[in-house]
Amino acid sequence: MLKVQAIVTVPPYAPFIGEVAAHPLVCGLRFNTVMPVAHLREEVLARLASHGVPLWVDLKGRQLRVTTAAMPPFTEVRVSHAVRVDVPADCFFDDGREHARIVAVDGDRLILEDGPRRFVGPGESVNVPSASLEVLGTLTDGDRAWVAAMRATDQRRVMLSFCEHASDVDEVRGLLPGAEVVPKIESLRGLEYARVHGASQGRLMAARGDLYVEVVAPHRIVRALRAVITADAEAWVASRLFPSLARGSVPEAQDVGDAAWLLSLGYRTFMLGDEVCLRRESALAALNLLQAVAEAM
């Protein structure tokens, strides 16, 4: 059997965290900081860190996220950072399933020509895969608040979304001395960062959810995943793992083949994302399926 391990995303108030943490494949828990909390950040982190496995706090960094609700048809979308981009420019919502065109930009305001033709809610991610895109700033105010809570609770493990420059990691370590940072590779600039720096600043993660959209042409994800594992032979892989288990108890064939292919590339640490981890049954089923595929390999 190939030796594999998993990091599981945990909803902050899930009653099954202890059971998931005890699974033999689990080597860590991930807290996605976009999840809402009703208690002090320090209390949330202390409780999540009490399950006997390492806790990773996922900061959003340069990732563009909707900050205020937007309504069609002529939508203005406000995002988490001020940006510059040559217009018109394509942008994508819902993991690339919805396309819109940016016709003007004013700081953190994206003016869309048309779409998406639905309510766009706060927290949704937006991908703008343009070479001209410039995101102004790295950590958000929310990120900084979570870093302060990490200092107060002596937590030092950080996942950094959309890491693209060495200075992105340096900024985190400047606020959180001694931080163990995992740069998440989610864009073309991130792939260049991986090529130049490898694992010199921290274990790399191929975060396929956004990376798949950012490479634009779907087949390019193959080369991108190979590039990350080439840059760091112990790189982790995340996102879009076993999505069928979030919808039912029987995995679809393509999910099994996907995990087997990632194992054949050399990935051994898998991070299970939000969707499949929202329920106890789907989270445990995903862990058991990963173990079974590794045994079959």
Image (cartoon, rainbow, N blue to C red):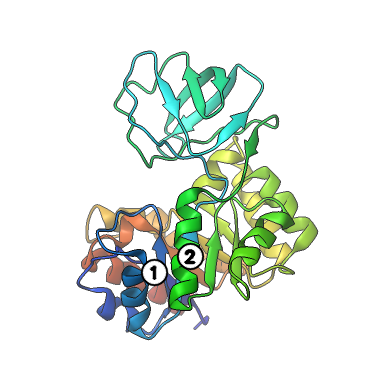
- Of the pair 98 and 256, the residue shown nearer to us: 98
Using residue 176 as the reference point, say whether residue 200 is left or right of it. Answer: right
| Residue 155 versus residue 109 in the image, above or below | below
Task: Identify the mark at residue 148; answer none if there is no mark.
Answer: 2
**Residue 283 point in image, percent of width and height:** 30, 67
| Res 172 visible | yes
Using residue 128 as the reference point, say whether residue 276 is left or right of it. Answer: left
Which quadrant would residue 30 be assigned to in this image?
A: bottom left
Label 2, label 1: how far apart the Cα atoms are = 23 Å
**Residue 219 point in image, percent of width and height:** 60, 42
| Number of dots carrying numbers | 2
Q: Residues within 10 Å of mark 2 (few under 14, many from 20)?
A: some
Q: Which residue ends up furthest to the left in the rendered image?
A: 15
* Mark 2 or 1, closer to the camera: 2
Q: Which residue is mark 1?
A: 8
- Mark 2 or mark 1: whose residue is earlier in sequence: 1
Task: Identify the mark at residue 75; answer none if there is no mark.
Answer: none
Q: Amino acid at mark 1?
A: Val
Q: Residue at x 49, y 49 (%)?
A: 141
**Residue 176 point in image, percent of width and height:** 58, 69
Q: Residue at x 47, y 77 (%)?
A: 5
| Res 296 visible | no
Q: Residue at x 42, y 36 (%)?
A: 66
Disc 2 is placed on an element classified as helix
